[in-house]
Image (tube, rainbow, N blue to C red):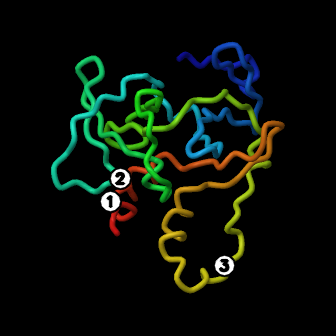
């Protein structure tokens, strides 16, 4: 994936899409029927390779390790991290591999990959703007909420924009019962 900058430096080109200053490209995917996205600059690749080697005694949110072209990646299960039931058709799943700038080599198992969406940065709304304490008994929901940077509306619906680096930092605590 190559990025080129325009003459004035206010836009860059990724593939065939020009991204203006103040815009972000989101790699979007579906999990349990919901649309999620991450900044495409955090994504190294998307692959169909979903055969993982399990890790004994690991948190349930860690599916295992996958070997892609000789490089080992930890595989996290976004369904489990978000508290959704397991996906029956794992072979139809996709693996989103993140760049090492987000943390040590890791990827995230998703149900399917959607489109690349260009959105205005200012349109990503932080749902947790207020500092009110969470309702009683919502600790787990609060842990999951920290994964979400915000939401943005597009023609196809609402995208929950995730913080890629936070996924790796939080996977163990989200896997505890």
Looking at the image, do the residues carrying marks 3 and 1 touch, with CB atoms under 8 Å apart? no
| Residue 64 placement, left or right of 114 | left
**Which mark sits nearer the N-terminus, 1 or 2?**
2
* Distance between the alpha carbons at the discs numbered 3 and 1: 25 Å
SS class, disc 2? loop
Q: What residue is at 47 percent from the left and 27 percent from the top?
A: 92
Residue found at x 66% / y 78%: 131
Which residue is labeled 2 in the image? 61
Q: Nearer the viewer, mark 3 or mark 1?
A: 1
Q: Residue furthest left?
A: 56
Q: Residue 142: x percent and y percent?
A: 54, 71
Observer-side mark, 2 or 3, equals 2
Residue 136 versus residue 9 in the image, above or below: below
Q: Which residue is drawn at 44% across and 34% down?
A: 89
- Which residue ends up furthest to the top in the rendered image? 16
Of the residues under marks 3 and 1, which one precedes in the sequence? Answer: 3
Residue 103 sits above or below residue 145 on the image:
above
Look at mark 3 in the image and give the residue it sits on: 131
In the rendering, which numbered label is found on residue 172? 1
Image spot of residue 151 (x, y percent): 71, 52
**Residues marked 1 and 2 touching at CB (< 8 Å):** yes
What secondary structure is marked by label 3? loop
The answer to which of 79 and 5 lies nearer the viewer is: 79
Q: How crowded is mark 3: few (under 14 residues within 10 Å), some or many (20 or more)?
A: few
Residue 140 in picture, x, y percent from top left: 48, 71
**Which of the marked residues, 2 or 3, is nearer the chain's N terminus?**
2
Q: In this view, does 171 lie to the left or right of 37?
A: left
């Amino acid at each position: 994936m190559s990025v080129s900058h325009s003459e004035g430096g206010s836009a860059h080109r990724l593939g065939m899409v020009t991204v203006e200053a103040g815009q972000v490209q989101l790699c979007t995917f579906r999990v349990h029927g919901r649309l999620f996205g991450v900044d495409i600059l955090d994504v190294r690749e998307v692959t169909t390779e979903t055969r993982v080697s399990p890790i004994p005694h690991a948190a349930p949110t860690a599916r295992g390790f996958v070997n892609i072209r000789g490089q080992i990646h930890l595989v996290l299960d976004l369904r489990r991290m978000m508290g959704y039931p397991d996906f029956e058709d794992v072979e139809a799943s996709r693996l989103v591999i993140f760049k090492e700038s987000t943390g040590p080599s890791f990827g995230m198992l998703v149900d399917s990959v959607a489109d690349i969406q260009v959105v205005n940065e200012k349109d990503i709304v932080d749902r947790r703007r207020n500092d009110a304490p969470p309702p009683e008994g919502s600790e787990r929901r609060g842990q999951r909420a920290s994964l979400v940077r915000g939401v943005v509306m597009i023609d196809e619906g609402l995208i929950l924009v995730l913080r890629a680096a936070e996924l790796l930092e939080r996977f163990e605590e989200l896997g505890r019962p």
